[in-house]
Image (spheres, rainbow, N blue to C red):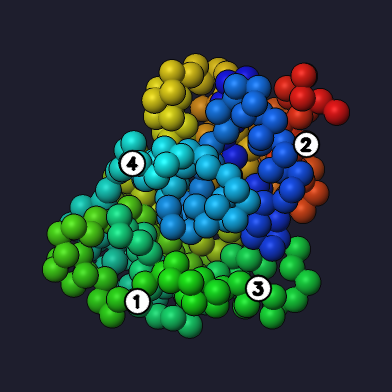
Amino acid sequence: MEMIATDMDGTLLNDGRSVSEENIKAIEEAQRAGINVIVATGRDYTEAVTPLKEAGLKLPLICVNGADIRREDGQIIHQQTLNLDVFKQMNAILTKEDIYFEMYTTKGAYTNDDQKGIDLIVDLLLSTGDFSSYDQAMQLAEKRFQEGAINRAKDYQALLEENSHIQLLKLLAFSKDEVSRERAKHQMEKELDVAISASARDNLEITHHEATKGSGIEIMSNHYGINLSETMAIGDNFNDVSMMKQAGYSVAMGNAEQEIKRICDHTTKKNTDNGVAHAIRSVIPHLQK
């Protein structure tokens, strides 16, 4: 094994949204063994790098589901953006279905409704982790605003039209109305050249059709001169499927959806039980304990 790609939320991170000491140790053991450990996440760079810094880790990053790919020092390797015309069409479809969405751009994430933004993150946290209380999830969601991880914009289209240096990487849409959500998804897949995945049961993550975690690990493997057959992908949700199919070996978290477990070569422990550390050590013989 030459490269390990791990998802963040529900995978590398525990339910406190931090990297456990055991996961840190296993990553460092893999690095000392000459294995390139990378993170593949739907988060933008700012939100992805924060818990890594807190853990004392510097890792290459596949951000925004493959739309923004970075070296461990933050240097951009590749970005895949969506043009304004595509945004206008997506905006029209989602607005028609009354679906709230956030924009992930080359200059950070944006919301046009603070409360809906908080509700989105609370739902994401509650659906991907074993939180003891709604209040705990709310506290973490509000922290996202307090730390400046998301910006405010009254008009998304005006922001993109008036600021040519801001390029769109992803839309993160959220709706508990499954009928509306699926109808919007179907229309976008039919009419637009986009990739649509999900990181929780009630959301849609929409990127350029060439921006997926699968394309991300392919770009990373080429960048570092690694054969894809010598890579392992670890994840828990549907936006991880593309990289699981690309990697030579795929691992589902113990807390993953059953559909994810069925397509993977191995299932490790939950994210609350150092599942990433167990995965790393279980497939690399000289790291087994």
Which secondary structure, mark 4? strand
Spatial separation of the CA atoms under disc 2 and disc 3: 26 Å
Label 2 vs 4, first from the N-terminus: 4
Quadrant of res 244: top right
Q: Is residue 117 left or right of residue 94?
A: right
Q: Residue at x 48, y 59 (%)?
A: 47
Residue pointed to by mark 2: 278
Looking at the picture, does residue 185 appear above or below residue 216? below
Quarter of the figure with residue 164:
bottom left
Rounded to the nearest angstrom, the CA distance separating label 3 from label 4 is 32 Å
Which image quadrant: the C terminus?
top right
The dot on residue 137 is 3
Q: In this rendering, is residue 162 above or below 48?
A: below
Q: Is residue 102 left or right of residue 80?
A: right
User: Residue 186, can we see it?
Assistant: no
Of the two numbered discs 2 and 4 in the rendering, the one whose residue sits closer to the viewer: 4
